[in-house]
Image: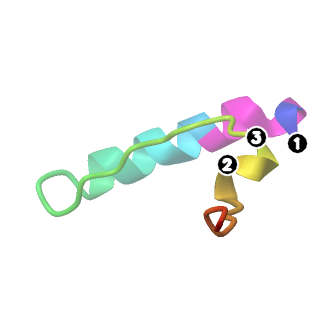
């Protein structure tokens, strides 16, 4: 939901602060649904 975008960003900021030095976290998006779909390469 795009209406909750700010809530997500605030949560990610808190996680980054809490986990500083222990993990790397990248927030990417929004991404189209087809970015997660793969298809076999054409043959022949």
Q: Position of residue 28 (x, y in %)?
A: 52, 39
Q: Secondary structure at mark 1?
A: loop
Q: Which residue is mark 2?
A: 35
Find the distance from the CA under tag 2 to the CA under tag 1: 18 Å
User: In the rendered image, which residue does mark 3 sit on?
Assistant: 32
Q: What is the secondary structure assignment of the residue under circle 2?
A: helix
Answer with mark 2 or mark 1, whichever residue precedes in sequence: 1
Of the pair 13 and 2, the residue shown nearer to us: 2
Tell me where residue 37 sits by quadrant. Answer: bottom right
Q: Residue at x 55, y 47 (%)?
A: 11
Q: Which residue is mark 1?
A: 1
Q: Which of the image's four quarters has the N terminus?
A: top right
* Residue placed most toward the observer, 25 or 42: 42
Q: Are the residues tagged 3 and 2 within 8 Å (C-beta)?
A: yes
Tell me where the magenta segment starts and ends, as one range.
3-8
At 76% from the left edge and 40% from the top edge, which residue is drawn?
32
Q: Give x and y (percent) for residue 4.
A: 81, 38
Label 1 or label 3, whichever comes before in sequence order? 1
Residue for point 65% across, 43% down: 8
CA distance for labels 1 and 3: 14 Å
Numbered badge on residue 15: none
Q: Nearer the viewer, mark 1 or mark 3?
A: 3
């Amino acid at each position: 939901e795009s209406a909750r975008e700010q809530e997500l960003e605030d949560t990610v900021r808190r996680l980054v602060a809490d986990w500083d030095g222990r993990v790397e976290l990248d927030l990417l998006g929004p991404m189209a649904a087809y970015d997660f779909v793969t298809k076999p390469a054409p043959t022949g």
